Image (tube, helix red, strand yellow):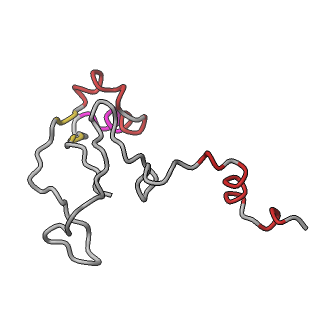
Amino acid sequence: MLLTSRLPTFAMVLLLYPGLLPAAGQTTPFGSPVSGTPDGTVPAWGGGLERIPEGYEPGELHVSPFPDDEPLMVITADRVSDLEDGLTVGQLALFDAYPETFRMNVFPSRRTH
């Protein structure tokens, strides 16, 4: 019996194509690139949160680590046509279904995980 027949498929793929994995240190523990986007809209990852947010209680809903942040903009149905290239099909559907009440607050991008 071949050794490869006992390996999980993912492990076999990695053995056959080792270049599929990025080099160590190039991704976060969640698999996203450490580097930010070239235009700076997504900053480089710096290791995540440095401290537990004030008010956090284990087993409870997570609290915002940035409670004082103000939205950079609020997207409403009136502005969707200007911004639709950056929205998903699902987001556009929500604006279409609830044009009077659905809105999206856009906050500064942070890499907390």
Range shown magenta:
94-99
Which image quadrant is residue 54 in? Answer: bottom left
Q: At 73% from the left edge and 50% from the top edge, which residue is drawn?
A: 16
Q: Considering only vertical position in the picture, is 50 above or below 71?
A: below
Relative to residue 41, is residue 5 drawn left or right?
right
Please identify the quadrant where the N terminus is shown: bottom right
**Residue 49: % across, % down:** 24, 61
Q: At 36% from the left edge and 33% from the top edge, which residue is drawn?
A: 87
Which image quadrant is residue 83 in? Answer: top left
**Residue 39: % across, % down:** 29, 30
Residue extending farthest to the right is 1
Q: At 27% from the left edge and 35% from the top edge, which residue is drawn?
A: 41
**Residue 94: % across, % down:** 34, 39
Q: How many marks?
A: 0
Relative to residue 83, is residue 29 drawn left or right?
right
**55 magenta-colored:** no
Please identify the quadrant where the C terminus is shown: bottom left
**Residue 15: % across, % down:** 70, 55
- Report the predominant secondary structure element of the magenta stretch: helix
Q: Considering only vertical position in the picture, is 16 above or below 41?
A: below
Relative to residue 7, is residue 74 drawn left or right?
left
Q: At 41% from the left edge and 46% from the top edge, which residue is drawn?
A: 33
Which image quadrant is residue 103 in? Answer: top left
Q: Considering only vertical position in the picture, is 7 above or below 40?
A: below
